[in-house]
Amino acid sequence: MARGANLPAIAAFNETVVLDAVRRSPDGLSRVELAARTGLSAQTVTNVTRRLLQQGLIREAGKQSEGSPGKPRTILRLNPAGAYAVGVHLDPTVIACVLLDLEGSVVAHVHRPSPPDGDAVSTLAAAVGAIREVLATPGVDPERVIGVGVAAPGPIDAERGVVVRPPLIPSWNDFHLRDELTAATGLPSLVAKDVTCAAVAERWSDPAGASRDYAFVYYGTGVGVGLVLGGEVYTGSTDNAGDVGHVLVDPGGTLCACGRRGCYGESVRPYRLVMQGLWAGVLTPPVGTTVAPEEDLQLDVETVDELFTELASAAEGGDAGAREIIDRSIRNSAFYLSNLTSLLDLDRIVYGGPSWSRVERRYLDQLPARLAELDTGILTHGIAIASSAIGEDVAAVGAAALVLDETFSPRAVVR
C-alpha cells in the first residue's frame, strides 16, 4: 500500500492514500487505524478525512468499541454515491456499457449490438446512446460522474486516445476515439486496451489481493491476455501488453494472417472454430453460401456469434465433431498457458469475455488436466483456473474502474 507524507503541499496525494486505504477495507476503518495503515500523523488523518467527508467521498458508519475503556471510534467507509464512472467495451460483436459507483459496484448496464460493418462512426454513435442511457439511471447525480473509460481492441495509442490498427476491425484504423467521445458526451475520457481493462476489473473486484500474480484470458471476438504481476496490472511500455495472438502453439495448424501456421489467437478464436465446424459438416452453412474445404467465408460478426453458439451447444450435446473442434482449442490453450505460467511464475488463470460462457464448462473441465500433462516440474505450486465473477461485462467494468483509479489512486497522483 502507498504510504502518505505529512507535508501540506501534497494534500491531494494524502487524500488518495486515505481513500485507497478505506476502499481496501470493506468493513471500514477508524481514524486511528488509518493513521497506522498509511503512516500519516493523527492530525493529518483528521484533516484529510474531514475534507473527504465534505466532498461526499466517505461517510461515517457508526461507532465501534476497540475493547478498551474510552470513547468508541467512528468507522469510516466509502460513500458509494460519492462518485460514478462510465465504462464502455467496444467489441466487434457487442457494445457493453456500465455505470460504476465509487465502491466499484455496477449500478446500471446496457448492451447493444455492434454495427455489423464495424463502421467507427456508427459504433461511436451506438456507444454514446448507451452512455446516455446509463447516465439517466434514477438516483444518480450527473454531477458526480467523473468520466468515461473505453475498452477497445488493440493496438492503441494511449497517450492520444487513438485506436491504431485493430486487425479484426480495420475500419477503426487511427480513429481518435477519446477526443470523439469527449466531444459527444462532455465527459473526460480515456482509452485502454480491452485485455488491460479486464485485468483491472478482476483486480478491483479483489482489493485484498488473494492472488498477486495471475493472467486474465480475455475471450471475445479474438483472444488476449491481461497480466497482474506483483499485485499490479502490467501494461507494457506503450500500454499494449497482452497481444498473444501470434505465439506458435500448433505447428502445421491453421494458417494465420501473419503467414505462419498454428498461431494461438487464430487457433482458438470463435471465427476459426466456426469455420472448422462448417468444413467438418458439424454446422449448417448460412443461406446463400457454399463451403469449400480450407476456404474461409466472409461472415459478419452476428453470424459468427450465432454459429459459435451452435457449435458449443453441439459439443455439449455430444456431437463428436464439435467436441473435437472445441477440445483442440483447449489443447492449444493449455500449451500456451503452460509456457506463460512457467515463464512468469503465475499461480492463477482467470477466463472471461463475451464468448467465454459458451465454452466455459468444457474448458474448466479439461484445462487443469491438460496443464498437468505439460508440467515440466519447474513450478512448485498448482495453477488455479477460474471464471471471472464479473461476467461478460468484465472489460467495460475495468474501463470504468480505470477512470476511478486515474482519479483516486495514489499511483495516478504521483506519476
Image: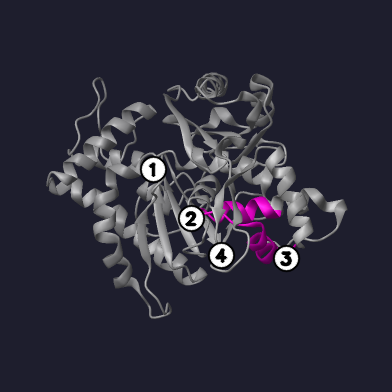
For the point 61% across and 36% down, the residue is 82
Magenta-span inclusion, residue 20:
yes
Q: Nearer the viewer, residue 270 or 367?
A: 367
Q: Nearer the viewer, mark 2 or mark 4?
A: 4
Q: CA distance from mark 2 to mark 4?
A: 27 Å
Q: Amino acid at mark 1?
A: Gly
Side of 401 relative to 414 (left or right): left
Q: Which residue is mark 1?
A: 391
Q: Main secondary structure of the magenta part?
A: helix
Query: Reading the chain from its start, which is encountered first: label 1 or label 4?
Result: 4
Q: Which residue is mark 2?
A: 206
Element class at badge 3: loop
Q: CA distance from mark 2 to mark 3?
A: 23 Å
Q: Nearer the viewer, mark 1 or mark 2?
A: 2
Q: Please identify the quadrant where the N terminus is shown.
A: bottom right
For the point 62% across and 24% down, the residue is 142
Q: Amino acid at mark 2?
A: Asp
Q: Is residue 161 above or below residue 64?
A: above
Q: Is residue 386 above or below residue 83?
A: below
Query: Reading the chain from its start, which is encountered first: label 3 or label 1?
Result: 3
Q: CA distance from mark 3 to mark 1?
A: 37 Å
Q: Nearer the viewer, residue 295 or 388?
A: 388
Query: Reading the chain from its start, which is encountered first: label 1 or label 2?
Result: 2
Q: Which residue is mark 3?
A: 39
Q: Nearer the viewer, residue 100 or 120?
A: 100
Visible residue check, residue 413: no
Residue range corresponding to the magenta coloring: 17-40
